[in-house]
Amino acid sequence: KKQRYEVYDLSTDGQETDNIYSRKDNAVLRDMMLEFQASLARSIAGQDYPESEVRKGEPEPRFWTDVDAYRVYFDDWRDRPEYSSRLKGK
């Protein structure tokens, strides 16, 4: 079965109505996407972990507001709608 690829210029076509894939040589983009998909499959299978498996609960789950490296950005992010509710009181 032949795969159909789709590429959209989201800056001008937010509704994804105009597939521009055939207008350009998109072999590089296609190869990048295929490598990403292969990498994702390896990760899901645990192949990129030293133990060669995904261990439930490891590393211990944590939320981004609990990561010290992000705290320096909290003041800048507090007024942004996508973060404001999570940053109240932080």
Image (spheres, rainbow, N blue to C red):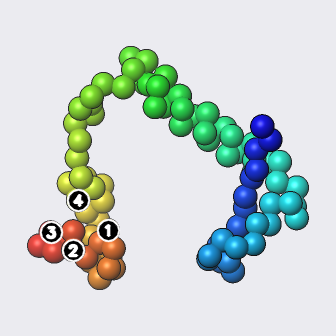
* Contact between labelled residues 3 and 1, with CB atoms less than 8 Å apart: no
Quadrant containing the C terminus in the rendered view: bottom left
Between the residue at mark 4 and the residue at mark 2, the CA separation in whole angstroms equals: 11 Å
Q: Quadrant of residue 37?
A: top right
Q: Residue furthest top?
A: 51
Q: Quadrant of residue 9?
A: bottom right
* Number of the front mark, 4 or 2: 2
Between the residue at mark 1 and the residue at mark 4, the CA separation in whole angstroms equals: 10 Å
Location of residue 53 in the rendering, given as x and y in whole percent from the top left corner:
39, 20
- Amino acid type at circle 1 is Tyr
Label 1: which residue?
73
> Is 83 positioned to the left or the right of 36 in the image?
left
Label 4: which residue?
65
Numbered badge on residue 49 = none
SS type, badge 1: helix
* Number of the front mark, 1 or 3: 3
SS type, badge 2: helix
* Contact between labelled residues 3 and 2, with CB atoms less than 8 Å apart: no
Location of residue 52 in the rendering, given as x and y in whole percent from the top left corner:
43, 18
Neighbor class of circle 3 (other Cα within 10 Å; few <14, some 14-19, many 20+) is few
- Amino acid type at circle 3 is Lys
Numbered badge on residue 85 = 2
Q: Which residue sits at x=44%, y=25%?
A: 46
* Contact between labelled residues 4 and 3, with CB atoms less than 8 Å apart: yes
* Number of the front mark, 1 or 4: 4
Neighbor class of circle 2 (other Cα within 10 Å; few <14, some 14-19, many 20+) is few
